[in-house]
Amino acid sequence: MSIVDQALDRTAAITAATSDWLNPILIKETRQATQSKLFWTVFLLFVALSWIVLVLGTLAMWGELETQPTAEVFFWWNFSVLSFAILVVVPFGAYRSLLSERELHTYDLLRITTLSPRQIVRGKLGTSLLQIVVYYSAIAPFIAFTSFLQGFDVVWISWVLVMSFLWSMALCTGALLTGISSRQNQWQSANMVGLVVMLLIGWGVVLSFVVQGRRAVDFEDPDFWWVNGITLLAAVSYVILAGQVIVARLTFASGNRSTGIRVVLVLQFWLVVAVVGLIAVSGRPIVFDPDFQMTMGVLVLLHWTGAGLFLATESDFLSRRIRRRLPGNRLLRLLAAPFLPGGATGTVLVLGHLVLIGVGLLVSAFGVASVPYTAERVQTLVIILLNVIIWVGVASVLARWCRKLSVRFTPAAVRVLTVTLFVIVQIISTIPAMLDSDMARDLVWMSALSPFLMSSAVSDFHGIYSGFGASFSSYAIAWTIVIATAVLALVINLPAMLAGVARIVRDPGPDAHRGDTQAIPPPPEEPIGA
């Protein structure tokens, strides 16, 4: 046997051994994608358009190639073709890949295999990653040609290509999440149309940014890299959260769908605290800017509002599989309880962090009481915080009451009911202002449960803005109402939260519940993220 044959045999053996470690979904999806007519049509059009841009652009600017900065023009046209492929075609393909599993009834076959939901998601994303790499490889020769032209900025073009690659992966994750968000055909059609529209809008936004060229960014500004790092960190964290939601949607009803999501939510919160602390330690003055603090505070509260709306409305049922995996030590159970499935434990997790934020705002309020503008920002955040506590508490209470009325009430129905009730309260709060401005000034307490109108009242009281004109007595009554309602929400949910945690801590295990109604699973419900 010749040396070449030995090398080929050894390579084949290594390849066979390596393929055993690859994700089967990745191999299946890659084979299907590369053999599909859509992929080859888009790929050939992609290469053809790139050649047309190269040839026609060279002929049109032949006399300017060596004297004018034409590299930016060529790059813009090449990037237009590349960005459409990676920001529209590939994410839409990821959406269709998971949706087609349901349409062709092959998803149930995947679920009964030894593949975990996490492996399925990784395989789908891995296929999208390979397609993106293929498109980048195809555009590489044209970018190499552009690098020989005048005005080629290596840093700018490298930054655009890297950020586009990461943004494409984020869009693929969001597309997968959209694909499993609904099971009804009418909603799937609406999701598909909405996804295509959003992808095209996003593609246009990216192109409008790139067409501005190097003028759009300042690489010498340290704040630019701070913003890039924070934005990238936030995007990665929410991509991971979206991946956890997808895994939860693919997990069996008896599995633990919630813990991974809760861990990511908590890590995101403390990541924000760590980043703000890092910015403060590095001496960046922006961290002391009231507008920056207001923006970060609102984003954090919106984060926990969304988390509370989903976690507080979960069913409190724990399957035998979950109870079997509970820690043996009661202290460990107590620490793990907020991260286990259940509306009561979800309320503990969300309200616990909201109370922690409230303590921080209370300490800040004493420190900035003498500064009107900063005090107004802190009080506005307090108003938003109290409203978040109220509505998370309302969602938790509605979930328990609705399940007592009928086990057919799904978490999704409770969330819709909570949002509807919130909208009704906001409409009622605006009635005095619609009838008469003097009435609105005297009845500002009717707007106590509207974070929007109460924020205006706070600004008016501190003299930041004008036009609301709230009297002091009505303003004080409004504050009393919102504080009392938040405390009431905590008090009403406290017994259920304590009972939910105690049930987990004292659970003797699944075998001790034989014959108990708690061991019988309730009717199927919408999974996490419904």
Image (cartoon, helix red, strand yellow):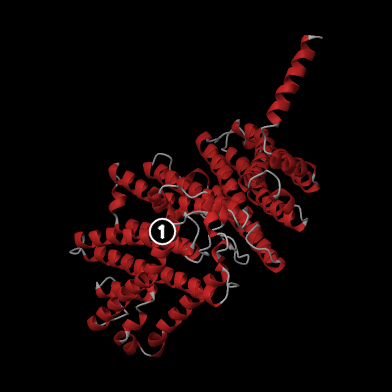
Location of residue 184 in the rendering, given as x and y in whole percent from the top left corner? 69, 66
- In the depicted structure, whether residue 405 falls above or below residue 114: below
Residue nearer the viewer, 47 or 384: 384
Say which quadrant the N terminus sits in. top right
- In the depicted structure, whether residue 407 falls above or below residue 264: below
Instruction: Specify whether residue 213 is in view.
Output: yes
Tell me what residue is drawn at x 57 percent, y 75 percent.
406
Location of residue 189 in the rendering, given as x and y in whole percent from the top left corner? 70, 65
Tell me what residue is drawn at x 43 percent, y 84 percent.
428
Residue nearer the viewer, 57 or 103: 103
Q: Where is residue 40, by image quadrant? A: top right
Say which quadrant the C terminus sits in. bottom right
The outermost residue toward the top is 2
- In the depicted structure, whether residue 21 falls above or below residue 418: above
Crowd class of label 1 (few under 14; some 14 to 19; many from 20; radius 10 Å)? many
**Looking at the picture, which amino acid does disc 1 mark?**
Leu
Q: Where is residue 226, by image quadrant? A: top left
